[in-house]
Image (spheres, rainbow, N blue to C red):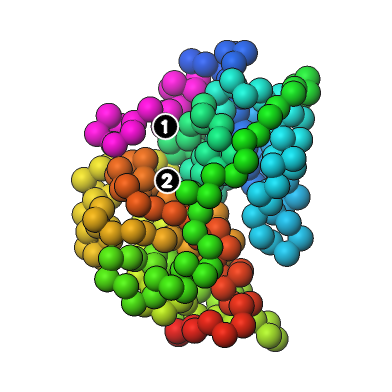
């Protein structure tokens, strides 16, 4: 991992195994359903539900500082706690890294390989729910430098020094799906005009770990996504694109990357914006 631009933002399964009982470490498991967590999770991990803890009812990211403070407080996290994030889906931990950085939390790490690798290695699992005493957490105001809004995305279309990066599945990009299924009445499908397609999962090995620096660099270079350009990744609701922001900025060291967290959930519902299929 030392070859990455910022290797300290990742921890491997052995490191986490060695620090399971560290009182200044808090492990967060993020998923769309609590059932996998209830069945088995990394010992000491606190569960966050994507739909009820991280998203608003309209599926926009909940970037309210007070809501984030309450979530952190009930998870037993202080401003000085080192948080290790993972999920059942590839890349979830890196999206959570982006969210923590938006609110100014410094000590956040991603578990390389996540739950998949931990379980495959036969490491200990727990079924009892993890609870911790509530803390007093203070979030900073959201860092606007980590986000790009739809008006700037619209203004960037066609600019040679900017890449709109669609990291969804090919079915979503081509307009066959709206999120994870064919579109329902009134749902518009396709992609932002001129967007380059590179599915986020292509950056991972089969065991769920990140590909090497050279492999990642070659992957993005092959699509013309180079460090000299400003890159705006987007997906459906901002999670997979938050993951891609992490890969580009922290693993490859790209200087100008911002997550379009509104993503297709917002863009497809805006009046008077262009859509390609």
Based on the displayed image, in which of its 4 quarters is residue 71 positioned? top right
**Which residue in the structure is indicated by mark 2?**
246
**Which residue in the structure is indicated by mark 1?**
9
Judge whether 56 appears above or below 29 on screen. below
Label 2 CA crowd tier, 10 Å (few <14, some 14–19, many 20+): many
Q: Is residue 31 magenta?
A: no
- For marks 2 and 1, the one nearer the N-term is 1
* Residue drawn at 25 percent across, 42 percent down: 213
Label 1 CA crowd tier, 10 Å (few <14, some 14–19, many 20+): many
Picture coordinates of residue 255, whole percent (x, y):
32, 47
Q: The N terminus lies in which quarter of the figure?
A: top left
Q: Which segment is the magenta one?
A: 1-17
Picture coordinates of residue 111, whole percent (x, y):
48, 33
Res. 116 in view: no
**In the image shown, does 150 or 107 lie closer to the viewer?**
150
Based on the displayed image, in which of its 4 quarters is residue 36 positioned? top right
Residue 180 tag number: none
Res. 214 in view: yes
Judge whether 63 appears above or below 164 on screen. above
* Residue drawn at 74 percent across, 29 percent down: 73
CB contact under 8 Å: marks 2 and 1: yes
* Residue drawn at 49 percent across, 59 percent down: 148
| Real-space Cα separation, disc 2 to disc 1, in angstroms | 10 Å
Judge whether 53 appears above or below 110 on screen. below
Picture coordinates of residue 84, whole percent (x, y):
54, 30
Q: Is residue 2 magenta?
A: yes
Picture coordinates of residue 125, whole percent (x, y):
61, 27
């Amino acid at each position: 991992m030392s070859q990455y631009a910022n290797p300290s933002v990742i921890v491997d399964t052995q490191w986490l195994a060695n620090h399971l009982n560290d009182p200044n470490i808090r492990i967060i498991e993020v998923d769309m359903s609590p059932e996998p967590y209830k069945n088995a999770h990394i010992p000491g991990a606190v569960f966050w539900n994507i739909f009820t803890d991280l998203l608003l009812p309209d599926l926009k990211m909940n970037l309210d500082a007070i809501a984030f403070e309450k979530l952190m407080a009930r998870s037993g996290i202080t401003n000085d706690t080192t948080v290790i994030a993972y999920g059942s889906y590839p890349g979830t931990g890196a999206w959570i890294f982006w969210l923590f950085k938006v609110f100014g939390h410094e000590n956040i790490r991603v578990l390389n390989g996540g739950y998949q690798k931990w379980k495959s290695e036969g490491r200990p699992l727990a079924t009892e729910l993890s609870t911790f005493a509530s803390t007093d957490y203070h979030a900073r105001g959201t860092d606007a430098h980590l986000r790009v809004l739809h008006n700037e995305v619209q203004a960037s279309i066609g600019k040679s020094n900017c890449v709109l990066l669609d990291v969804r599945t090919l079915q979503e990009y081509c307009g066959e799906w709206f999120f994870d299924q064919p579109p329902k009445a009134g749902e518009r499908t396709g992609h932002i005009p001129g967007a380059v397609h590179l599915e986020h999962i292509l950056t991972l090995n089969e065991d769920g770990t990140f590909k090497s620096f050279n492999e990642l660099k070659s992957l993005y270079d092959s699509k013309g996504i180079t460090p000299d350009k400003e890159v705006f990744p987007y997906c459906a609701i901002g999670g997979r694109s938050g993951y891609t922001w992490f890969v580009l900025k922290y693993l490859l060291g790209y200087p100008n990357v911002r997550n379009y967290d509104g993503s297709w959930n917002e863009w497809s519902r805006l009046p008077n914006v262009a859509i390609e299929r």
